[in-house]
Amino acid sequence: MGYENAWLNYRRLQGSAESTYFSSDCTDSQGRTARTAIEELKRAAREIFGLDMQEKSGTQDAGICLKLNREAAAGEEGYHIYEKDGRVTVESAGGRGLLYGSFALIRMLQTGRKIGGADLTEVPQNPIRILNHWDNMDGSIERGYSGNSFFFQDQKVLVNDRTRAYARLAASVGINASVINNVNVKGNATKLITETYRRELQEMAEIFADYGISLYLSLNFAAPMEIGGLDSADPLDENVREWWSRQMEDVFTGIPNFGGFLVKADSEGRPGPFTYGRTHADGANMLADAAAPYNGTIIWRCFVYNCQQDWRDRKTDRARSGYDNFMPLDGQFRENVVLQIKNGPMDFQVREPVSPLLGGLKKTNQILEVQIAQEYTGQQRHVCYLIPMFKEVLGFHTYCEKEKDTVADLVIGRTYGQTRCGMAAVANTGDDENWTGHDLAAANLYGFGRLAFHTDLSSEEIAGEWIRCTFGMQPEVVEKVSRILMMSWPAYEKYTSPLGIGWMVNPGYHYGPNVDGYEYDRWGTYHRADHMGIGVDRSSGGTGYAQQYHEPNASMYEKIETCPEELLLFFHHVPYSFRLKTGKTLIQHIYDSHFEGAEDVEKMVAEWESLREFLPEKIYQRVLARFEHQKEHSKEWRDQINSYFWRKSFVEDEKHRTIY
Ligand code: GCV
């Protein structure tokens, strides 16, 4: 399928004074990313001004000069853009910085910022800014809502124009690493580390390297047995260790700019060190030792829990499992291991508390994992701009120290001085023409990159940039699309599962309402509703999960009175008659919230409909079709949930609206 250029869809600027800078460029760097930067500037000159940019050798007479200065204060990935006497300089200590600076310069044009007099320095805060693709070798994507994979098809690795287009998009927002295959590594994906796929992966890695992106792979912990002919994958077995050392040598020396591996072990049926009575530190360290000679990174996921739970058992709590499994190992991991921690303790619900591992672990490298694939947030059929959620997570005070204690401080390495740390997103792309299925879902991909670069950017700023780059600068469009984006996550929460309860979805595919879908299941995901009340008691009298936080968070969550209401039912079992701060009873809040959420969708649709004349018809229609579905589907959510609770509680809606 063809592809569009998403936010890199440059629009013509007629008669703009800025065009004079774009008549010529130069660089004193021989590096490949600087080369890419020059090509990107030329492309922008062509597409925005219709200019054929001339490349000069001297720095004196060029309009834009990319200057490599090993001493530059902005470092290897940061940049300083300044204009003086009609010339623009982009300065950095590294090729990546020159590339990011060039994209920033183009973004200035596309968002209407003046280049004349510019003096802008930006340094990415997170060292690792990585996308995790859950793409399978047959071309399907686990939790993919935008078509098929553009990395794999029919058990083959794809390398084509789209590979470069992807790398461009990712690099333009500062992504510097990408894991291309699913963390559930099975079948031929296990062989991605062997000769079988080496040539294609080399080609892909070369393209990625042009854009400053390191290729990563997910690996199968049982590979020594599945493809190595060994009878064990025990991380302390010498034969196993040697086998991994040989594999790592082949991969790291055979694939240019290879970054390392992502590992899901002992989780949801995947193999891991537990089989051999070993710890996750034993497992991760074995791989880390094998990767160390090449400065390779092992990213080890903390998504480890018992998925064979008995729903009758009220003491076992899935929310506790990340902390229970990994806290005892703090300080035992090698320097090139990074633990990747999902933002919440469960699994990417529309609202969860921040994982207590963030701020719990003090001597271990950490990456925050978020999901921009909208698995539980509308699957890219509903609009749900997730950057405000990520901002809340990043801004959360863990109280792990007296200062520099937010999640952002932790993952950028400000709290404990780590350099292998950062942010990961489960990606939302596929081979759909517009990359993300829902056009507005591209704001999450764009936004993740920008936020990982700069955790201080606000959700509104990011939305504004993305809208201007994607749709242009008409004030109506900027204002209304921004309003839609900003109200979308709260709306989704209101009509699906407010107050932190989560999980009321159809099992397996996780779409659409099903209040008891996961209630009598083995996955540890319960709401415990009865005729009197709802919620999970995670205080000391319940599962004790609230005590995994530092004070004062532990006490805040422990008590109903101080627990933030948006998480009330995550932490407490609450009677329907309980009065919230608004004075409403819990049951009335449930009814109101679902009616309100569905009304919010109608407002969003009306905003979109009023924009028809300002948008390309194709995009307008594409989004409208999704909105029409969302409108109907939000009513389905509203009616099913409200009817369920009315039938359970027998309490009438004070406003006597229709409940079935
Ligand atoms: C890739 C959830 C998803 C799974 C996913 C898993 C994970 O359980 O539903 O599809 O597996 O998370 O993050 O590993």
Image (cartoon, rainbow, N blue to C red):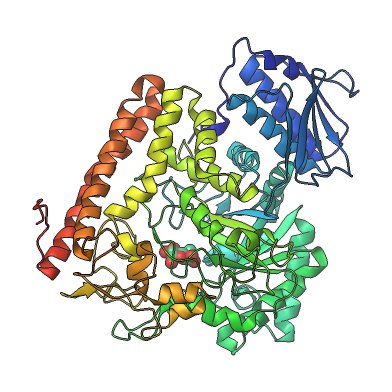
Q: Is residue 449 above or below residue 272?
A: above
For residue 210, which quarter of the picture? top right
Looking at the image, residue 93 sits to the left or right of residue 318; the answer is right
Q: How many marks?
A: 0
Q: Residue at position x 37%, y 82% from top?
A: 309
Q: Position of residue 306 (x, y in %)?
A: 44, 80
Relative depth, front residue between 451 and 625: 451
Q: Residue at position x 52%, y 82% from top?
A: 324
For residue 82, which quarter of the picture? top right
Q: Residue furthest top?
A: 15
Q: Position of residue 55 (x, y in %)?
A: 82, 21
Relative depth, front residue between 415 and 204: 415
Q: Is residue 17 above or below residue 404?
A: above
Q: Position of residue 597 (x, y in %)?
A: 27, 48
Tell me if I can see residue 162 in this picture: yes
Q: Position of residue 161 (x, y in %)?
A: 61, 36
Relative depth, front residue between 519 and 248: 519
Q: Residue at position x 13%, y 69% from top?
A: 649
Looking at the image, residue 211 sits to the left or right of residue 92; the answer is left
For residue 450, which quarter of the picture? top right
Quadrant for the C terminus, please: bottom left
Tell me if I can see residue 633 in this picture: no
Looking at the image, residue 571 sits to the left or right of residue 139; the answer is left
Q: Residue at position x 71%, y 67% from top?
A: 416
Q: Is residue 271 above or below residue 474?
A: below
